[in-house]
Amino acid sequence: MKMRYKLSRITFVIILIATLMVTGLNVISVSVVKAEKPTTEGCIGYWNSTHVGRGYSLLVGKGVDSNKPSLFSLFNQVIGGLVIPYPGKSLSSEVDDIELPFDINTLINVVLMIMMTVGFTFTFMMEGFPNFAHTSYAVIGAMVSFYLTRFANFNPYSTWPFATLVGGLIGLFLYLGVVNPIKRQGGAKEVTLTFTFIVIAMVLPQLAYIFNYWARYTGGSAARGYNLSSFDFSYRGIPGIAITSTATCILLVLWLRHFLTRDKTGLSLRAVAENEDLAATIGINTGRAHCVSWFISGALSALVGSIMTIYRGVGISGPEGLIINVMSGAILGGVYSVYGAIIGGLFVALAQDMLKKFFYIFFGLAIERWQGLLPMLFLATTLSLFPHGLLGSQGLSVEKIRSAYDDLMKRLKALFQ
């Protein structure tokens, strides 16, 4: 029986072979099919299963190297996508599956980017420096979800509040223990804080390596990455994470609207962001406003990490390269506008997905090797055309769009002359 799954936009054909495994382990082997070379075979890994004893062969559309960590990620994606029936139960029919007019992966990427960009903007508009460690909080949320699911038998979705709380506390700790002392010393505090958080961005992932060592050799769980996709559910062919993450993002946007326009704490936060000295003179507790913004920022990043464990998993060192995407979205929307962060995150996620598909048509699988350049391209383009963002100090207007278009044409003419 053949079943098709789309993993990383490459169609893999899973061939289910009814072979009784005496050891009780299901072996997932890989066959690499290339046009110019004979078929080669190798073993991805072993999957513990107490319900069925079958072997699985995986035909992939690109070469895999057993020495690369990405191979284990591929293994996790495969077992997360397989739908294995219990003995005597047939595979579910796909007749009732819902055909959506858009790509599920694009939807989830948009959701994650919006949440990350909003958290980054909260920090920037309050402190005035880019928090390069913002995406590193995600690995903290992933660790919390992985631990509670693997060792405490929690449902992955029920770990989201705990991951959010831990991420918020990490953000609060960084403000009270790092940011506030540096700000009190005066001087070039923005520059100092920027370099400080570059170092923190390198230190935080090391906690994941420590946890990985403990989970592997003490807890008995091989955590080369934090992937909980095998615990997910589906509704009529739609992954549960697509439904829940989208609903969470919508609720977040609605809450932000209420928080920043109706709530006293939200209004005081906006006042401090615009003019901290003036806000202090009218009796606003500026210290509490800073604490709230850092808690929200850390909580959102950790929540994204928790969501990613069910979506595609998180590597040991966290979501690598995501900070460039987040900065692009924040700058595009306007680093001093939370609503702009929502729009910027939406545009960046959609545009990157569209560009990948566009380049894939012309360059094929070669795009996989240099797709990391796309975030850099977006960041450079955004800084050139919209240095103050779409919803910056002057807001979005026809004049701004016309000015950006004229500037782009001048640059293109100068480039080709």
Image (cartoon, helix red, strand yellow):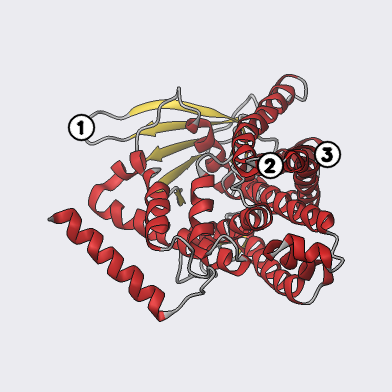
Identify the residue at the far bottom of this view: 398
Residue at image mark 2? 142
Q: Secondary structure at mark 1?
A: loop
Disc 1 versus disc 3: nearer the observer: 3
Horizontal side, residue 76 vs residue 410: left or right: right
Residue 316's disc is none
Residue at image mark 3? 152
Q: CA distance from mark 1 to mark 3?
A: 49 Å
Q: Residues within 10 Å of mark 3 (few under 14, many from 20)?
A: few
Disc 3 versus disc 2: nearer the observer: 2
140, above or below 260, in the image: above
Rendered location of residue 277, percent (x, y) = 76, 60
Label 1 or label 2, whichever comes before in sequence order? 1
Rendered location of residue 390, percent (x, y) = 48, 69
Q: CA distance from mark 3 to mark 2?
A: 15 Å
Residue at image location 23% in from the left, 29% down from the top: 37
Residue at image location 85% in from the left, 60% down from the top: 285
Residue at image location 64% in from the left, 60% down from the top: 245
Q: Secondary structure at mark 3?
A: helix
Q: Is residue 123 visible?
A: yes
Residue type pointed to by label 2 = Ala
Residue at image location 65% in from the left, 44% down from the top: 138
Q: CA distance from mark 1 to mark 2?
A: 41 Å
Q: Residues within 10 Å of mark 2 (few under 14, many from 20)?
A: many
Label 3 or label 2, whichever comes before in sequence order? 2
Residue at image mark 1? 36
Residue type pointed to by label 1 = Glu
